[in-house]
Amino acid sequence: MTRDLTNILSYLEFDEVKPFFAVELLFQSGTELGTNTTSLTADINASQTTLAVESVAGYFSAGTFTIGSEQITYTGISDLTFTGLTRGFDSTTAASHSSGATVTGGTIISAPLYFWTGTGDTTIDGITYIGTGTLMQISSIKETAEIQAAGATLTISGIPADLLSLALSVPYQGRIGKIKFGLIDADGDLLELESAFNMLAENGIDIGLESVDQSNVLVDMFVGYMDQMNINEGSETSTISLSLESKLLDLDRPVVRRYNNESQKALFPNDKAFEFLNDLQSKDLSWGRASETT
């Protein structure tokens, strides 16, 4: 028997409860991959979105740097100019800077991306989800009685180019992607699942998800790994098509584990169980009483 989980939405013909999807793309966050220093070759004001410097050697194609106390992100490099600047990043204050000022950075800072199929941004459990409305499409998510590694595909349009560039500055393949399901009322307010399911049950509607933890607002419908991403970049916004592979594929991958000191330290840094293993490989061990010779 096969059930298409995304078609659950079509079962809900009830004005007081409306379904939505939320997506979490857990890109690497806050990873420092390099530090460089250069200098401004011209004055800049607090709103300028390009920045000319003496050298860009060693800088990544997108990232963040610091001038004084201001952090600035950039999405590209053209000759000796950083482009696509976002001023006053990470709650710092955008300011004017003089020619010759030191530019320190080159760090790639990426962050998870969170979207939902509603309109406008919404905060759930302390996480702000960007509203995509109909701009986010989710392929069928099928559940079968057999053990099958079925994946899913996300297509998201209207993503700001600077947000996308920062997220893609670090490797994304193999990182976690989640598709979640939630419900809102007729006014667009979020509903706890227990409350929503009770309202549906009172009206004779069963969507087959009663076994999930109903104390939450969101429930996981698919958790897998980000795989291939196709990008159609525009001048201001981009469209991505991202395939997610099932975690069940892990069952087909060989588990490489060696019983040596290095492998043990990788898992348990303070464990010394295999510290002298290499010495034992060439050591002769005598068991029992030594034989007497005459």
Image: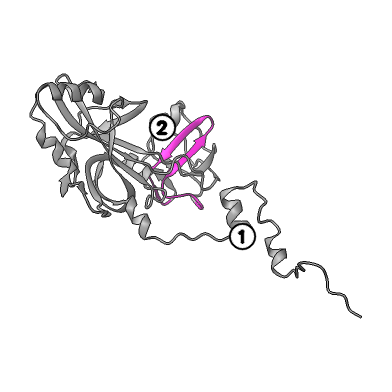
Query: Residue 91: horizontal and vertical position, in percent?
Result: 44, 26
Q: Is residue 232 visible to us here?
A: no
Q: Which residue is mark 1?
A: 260
- Asked if residue 216 lies left or right of residue 145, the reply is right
Seen from this angle, which residue lies furthest bottom?
A: 294
Crowding at dot 1, Cα within 10 Å, few <14 / some 14-19 / many 20+, comes out as: some
Amino acid on which disc 1 is placed: Asn
Q: Nearer the viewer, residue 30 or 235?
A: 30
Is residue 178 visible to the viewer in this orientation of the structure? yes
Examine the rendered structure and indicate whether residue 167 appears above or below residue 266. Answer: above
Residue 148 locus on image (x, y percent): 26, 55
The magenta segment is: 57-79
Q: Hey, which residue is sitting farthest left in the picture?
A: 13
Task: Tell me the amino acid under the disc marked 2.
Answer: Arg
Q: Earlier in the sequence, mark 2 or mark 1?
A: 2
Report the label total. Answer: 2
Q: Give the quadrant of residue 189.
A: top left
Q: Is residue 65 a member of the stretch shown in magenta?
A: yes
Q: Picture coordinates of residue 284 (x, y %)?
A: 75, 70
Residue drawn at (24%, 26%) of the image: 193
Q: Residue at x 78, y 67 (%)?
A: 288
- Mark 2 is surrounded, within 10 Å at the Cα level, by few (under 14), some (14 to 19) or many (20 or more) other residues, namely many
Q: Nearer the viewer, residue 140 or 206?
A: 206
Question: Residue 80: within the magenta?
Answer: no
Residue matched to label 2: 87
Give the x, y percent position of residue 275. 69, 56
